[in-house]
Amino acid sequence: MGDSDALAKVAIVKGERSCQTVRKAIEMVNGLDELADKPVLIKVNFICTKTYETGATTDPIIVEALIQILKEINRNIFVVESDATMTNADEASRATGTLALCEKYSVPFLNLRHYKEKVSVRVKSPEVMPKITFPRIVLESHIISAAKLKTHNETKVTLGLKNMFGLLPDKLKFKFHVMGIEKVIVDVNSIVRPALTIIDGFFAMEGNGPVNGTPVKMDLVIAGKDPVATDTVASKIMGFNPSLIYHIRRSAEKGIGTLENIETVGEEVEAVSRVFKRS
């Protein structure tokens, strides 16, 4: 495995739904150190307008804890999402309670679909997308992937890497599914790597995810700076073999992160795991 310095650290924290639980996970991996030099985008998962306890969308308590800690070092913070084929991100921000939270802390909510300045970036050795167009602010900021712990009917799981797919500003995302969404996820993450992945498992989702599955109260927060390692740990907690999940395995093969050299802190995977019903 190499020396301990080469290990990707992933925190697993079990606790009540609170900012304190989230903060504990972030502090275990020094997750917000060195984020003072440019804007920080907190990328939430708003695939629909359902609230956090359904297991479908990012819990506002995750966002609140991130804002509280970030404001100690950086006041240039945005909460971001992009419209999906069936969902308006602005409506979802209101319905989930996140917009009210943003207003409380004077942090803008930004629907990336409406961000005017866009930049096309070439993908080296692409899976399916030789070029990807991102909002300029995405390329000029630190990204925090504030994801959800849930199953997915196409990608098996939707965690931190899959959440980054939502940085694409297109509303009609069905075209990316046609290309092979797992391959598009790898291409997106090969260009934009999150500074921190934090996975909301206070209420997770099993079965028919990512929208219509069954909520599971897990009381977990999973966090790490290596997006592949963080998704690897989260998928194991859900009873999946991460090496059999295309976008996780392929991201590791492409050097986006590690599937193997991982140190977990906090809870043990075995102590908190549950075999999630498949989608």
Image (tube, rainbow, N blue to C red):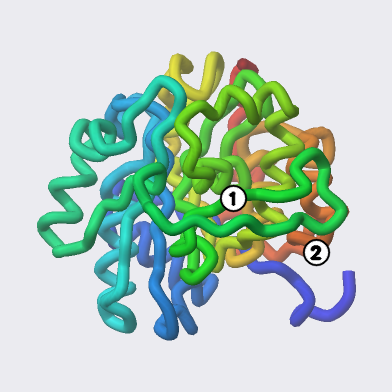
Q: Which amino acid does label 1 sit on?
A: Thr
136 over 113 or under it: above or below: below
Q: Where is residue 186 in the image (x, y as percent from the top left)?
A: 73, 46
Q: As drawn, is 127 to the left or to the right of 55?
A: right
Q: Residues within 10 Å of mark 2 (few under 14, many from 20)?
A: some
155 over 232 or under it: above or below: above
Please name the residue that numbered disc 1 is placed on.
133
Which of these two is toward me, 128 or 157? 128
Which of these two is toward me, 160 or 239? 160
Label 2: which secondary element: loop
Q: What residue type is labelled 2?
A: Asn
- Image point (13%, 47%), residue name: 100
Please name the residue that numbered disc 2 is placed on.
261
Label 1: which secondary element: strand
The answer to whether any part of residue 53 appears in the image is yes
What numbered label is drawn on residue 37? none
Q: As drawn, is 174 to the left or to the right of 146?
A: right
Q: Say which quadrant the N terminus sits in.
A: bottom right
- Image point (72%, 34%), residue name: 182
- Front of the two marks 1 and 2: 1
- Image point (74%, 62%), residue name: 262
Q: Position of residue 177 (x, y in %)?
A: 65, 25
Q: Where is residue 56 in the image (x, y as percent from the top left)?
A: 40, 28
Q: As drawn, is 91 to the left or to the right of 124?
A: left
- Image point (26%, 77%), residue name: 75
Q: Where is residue 276 in the image (x, y as percent from the top left)?
A: 60, 24
Whichever of callouts 1 and 2 sits on the residue coming sooner in the sequence is 1
165 over 63 or under it: above or below: above
Q: As drawn, is 179 to the left or to the right of 54?
A: right
Based on the displayed image, in which of its 4 quarters is residue 229 positioned?
A: bottom right
104 over 32 or under it: above or below: above
